[in-house]
Image (cartoon, grey):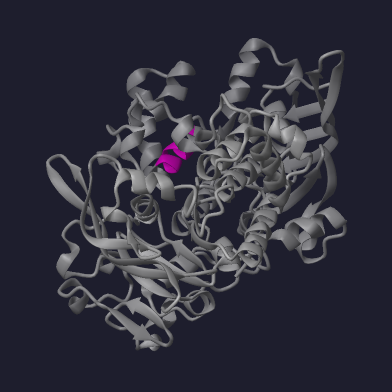
Amino acid sequence: MSDSLLSIEGLVVSYKTEGLRRPVLRDISLEIERGEVLGIVGESGSGKSTLLFAIMRYLTSNAVIESGAIRLEGLDLLRASREALGRLHGRRIAMVYQDPAQALNPAMRIGAQIAEVRRYHFGEPEVVAGRRALALLTDVGIEAPDRIATSYPHQLSGGQQQRAMIAMALAGEPALLLMDEPTTALDVVVQARLLELIRELKRRTGVSVLFVSHDINVVDAIADRIGVLYAGDLMELGPAKAVLRRSRNPYTLGLLAGIPRIDQRVRLRAIPGSPGARHDADDTCVFADRCAVAEPLCRATRPPLVEAAGRLSRCHFANDPARFAMLSRSEPLAVNPSSSTASPTSLLLVSGLSVDYGRRGLFRRDVVHAVRDVSFALRRERVLAIVGESGSGKSTLARTLLRLQRKVAGAITFEGQDVFSLTADALRRFRQRVQIVFQNPASSLNPRKTVGELVARPLLLAGVPAERARERAATMLAAVGIDQGMVARRPRELSGGEKQRVAIARAFVTEPALVILDEPTSSLDASVQASILELLDRLKIERRCAYLLITHDLAVVRQAADEVIVMQAGEVRESGPVEAVFSEPRHSYTRSLMSSVQKL
């Protein structure tokens, strides 16, 4: 490319572990043009974040750059001095991290953090830099920039934190912006606004963007070109529409087959096996062991990147598209399997529920109406989804159902009993019958406990003898696809999908009648998400339980739920069967949510 801003040539990166060098990036070569958005997708462990940190020279001490070059505007970043990199970082190249709460300085006000970049790179006086910080907050769509500038990071919502971080990244007027999973924790409305912001910045400033994400729909909505990484190999690279709609690589097609759709339910297909890196794959295809169309040639020779219909593909059969026909996107499903078998008796009945929060100001105490007059019924073997923006009351509702939050009005009846009238013993039994699977399994699993201990603990707390608890835990782990060899492992030794399976096993081991699923797939790769959704659907039928699904992913709702409640500002805006609400939304807020969804 004649107008390349960034050029990566033959990049090979390894990590030193247990005395061995494990390859993480294998001979990566790609370029980013000025004013271009290049998206990088792939499963966890594919090398996406390592690529970004290699560009920034932020790799950990056990990382080894074996060979290659990374050139920004002609300067080889791998051979640049620390002083030269200090001048470049923030000025010509800047990074937006996945978790802004971790990346922003908790002890500095937002405006001061942005102004610091201006003062360092441009030598602006404090007053001038402060005014520029306010202008940048306005540019990224922050409402009330004066208030946000004087706030600390913990006083901002997730969307506000992400926009503040983008403002800080733009403060140095960089030519290249690196974005690592910037939309993962955002609801669909904030996500759509963030993508529009990136498009506007690209139009107005000409900034180039390297956008890394496991969310293929989001990357499709923002990227000009897409690269697909797997186990450190670049599997496919080309124009976004060509790669995602006419792929010539079995790995890309496998990812696409696991993506739920908002317009209809489909039979999702997860890629079989584990996405673990192949350390002995120099003379073989790294994807061969999981590929449905692999042949002996694939396990004997590493395929080169070849030209195939206007894109590059690392596959021996890239120019034989008929071979991939069986891997195309999944066929539609007519109805939810549970629709005709569900019990007519309500398992959970919520009537006129209202929840308030007290918020103290300097001279007064404000009341926030978090949930207002919410009513619904949930039967066995049914899935009720609750959707809405951040702050709509979804999580408050879930905490109240678990009796972790006080109500101010209304009633919650579970299996015919008033939840808020339960005695201590009855409450203990209730919490065995109602379980929750949290959004982030890494933070909900005790890192000091083994997998077996984590799943057995709810039984031990319920008074089950230790030997019996271990047996039931092992049986439950096997039911969710965790083999015996993993029982002695700790959470840090598991992949994201394996951690979520352990969390699900822990929730189901007490044989609950109701499971609350709090964003159970939001941080998972497409293929892992498909396998988790299939697992949850199977367990629901086998255990005859019901789910309350809290999510901002409307495609997951279409795939997994029978009924849906749409909440805004603590109130129900619309509710009903998923097919009816999604096909003909009646409320303007529902329509705005659906129009914000990024879809292939």
Towards the viewer: 277 or 241: 241
Where is 135 relative to 229, above or below? Answer: above
Residue 500 in magenta? yes
Magenta part, dominant SS: helix
Of residues 573 and 469, the one drawn nearer to the viewer in this rendering: 573
Q: Residue at x 45, y 59 (%)?
A: 527
**Foreground: 596 or 425?**
596
Q: Residue at x 55, y 45 (%)?
A: 122
Q: Position of residue 494 (x, y in %)?
A: 34, 41
- Rendered residue at 35%/51% (across/down): 50
Q: Is residue 41 above or below residue 377?
A: below
Indicate the position of residue 214 as horizontal and vertical percent values.
48, 56
The spot of residue 287 in percent (x, y) is 29, 66
Q: Is residue 472 visible?
A: yes
**Left or right: where 29 falls relative to 97:** left
Compared to residue 592, the image places residue 547 above or below, namely: above
Q: Which residues are magenta?
A: 499-506
Q: Is residue 393 left or right of residue 61?
A: right
Q: Quadrant of the N terminus?
A: bottom left
Tell how many labels. Answer: 0
Residue 14 magenta: no
Q: Quadrant of the C terminus?
A: bottom right
The answer to whether residue 318 shows anywhere in this view is: no
